[in-house]
Image (cartoon, rainbow, N blue to C red):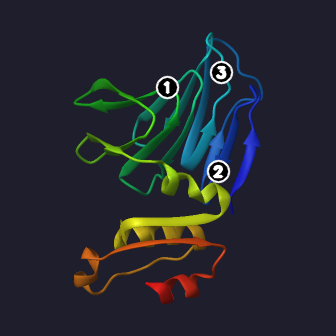
Amino acid sequence: MTTSVVLPDSTVVYLNSESSLRYPSVFEGDIRNVELKGEAYFAVAKDLKKKFVVSAPHSSQIEVLGTHFNIEAYEKDDKVLATLVEGKIGFIFTQDNVSKKVLMDPGQKLVYDSRDCKVQLYATSGESETAWKEGKIIFRNTPLEEGLRMLEKRYNVEFIIKNDRLKGDSFTGTFTNQRLERILEYF
């Protein structure tokens, strides 16, 4: 299930399945701090006096003043993914006990691997990363393992790949409200 919530500062948050968001009933002080486990799309209300901070698993954070972005940070996954649609954000992580920040521009996707504390930036339209908000699944030359992970979240199932030769396959297509069986037929 996906849902949306409006925070006390008028920020709109869309939560994907298996996700939770903790936030106060009133933002006090000069920081609007929320805690995310899972995936969410944020349309942050601008407030130049109060920074907006999303704390996520693996000691990572997103800092922002007002912007639109998607973050995927499930506790069970080693990776944290952030996609910036509009505005500017800073991704904060710890490497060798030192706090580091990577600034992102619109059209960028950041992949942080918590196992080796490495960050990579990619160019993206953001379309496939945020399609879940409209009930869509968009594959754009998506590797099989990543596509199956998207389906696992959406349909609350688990896939096991027994044939390693399939891991090199990738898929392109858009699905809206199709049953899982129908999508797997296309695969």
| Secondary structure at numbered mark 1 | strand
CA gap between label 2 and label 3 equals: 20 Å
Q: Which mark is residue 74?
A: none
Q: Is residue 57 above or below residue 181?
A: above
| Mark linked to residue 15 | 2
- Image coordinates of residue 176 in percent, x first then y, are 63, 71
User: Considering only order in the chain, which callout, 1 or 2, is on the residue closer to the N terminus?
Assistant: 2
Image coordinates of residue 154 in percent, x first then y, are 58, 68
Is 123 situated left or right of 127 in this image?
Answer: left
- The residue located at (58%, 29%) in the rendering is 67
- Looking at marks 1 and 3 on the same chain, the residue that comes earlier in the sequence is marked by 3
Q: Does residue 40 lie above or below 101 as drawn?
A: below
Q: Amino acid at mark 2?
A: Leu
Task: Write down the quadrant of residue 119 in the picture.
Answer: top left
The residue under the point 27% across, 87% down is 163
User: Which kind of residue does numbered mark 3 sit on?
Assistant: Lys
Quadrant assignment for the N terminus: bottom right
C-alpha distance separating marks 2 and 1: 18 Å
> In percent of the image, x 43 and y 84: which residue is there?
187
Q: Which residue is mark 1?
A: 63
Residue closest to the eye, 43 or 3: 43
Judge the density around disc 3: few (<14), some (14-19), many (≥20) Cα neighbours within 10 Å.
some
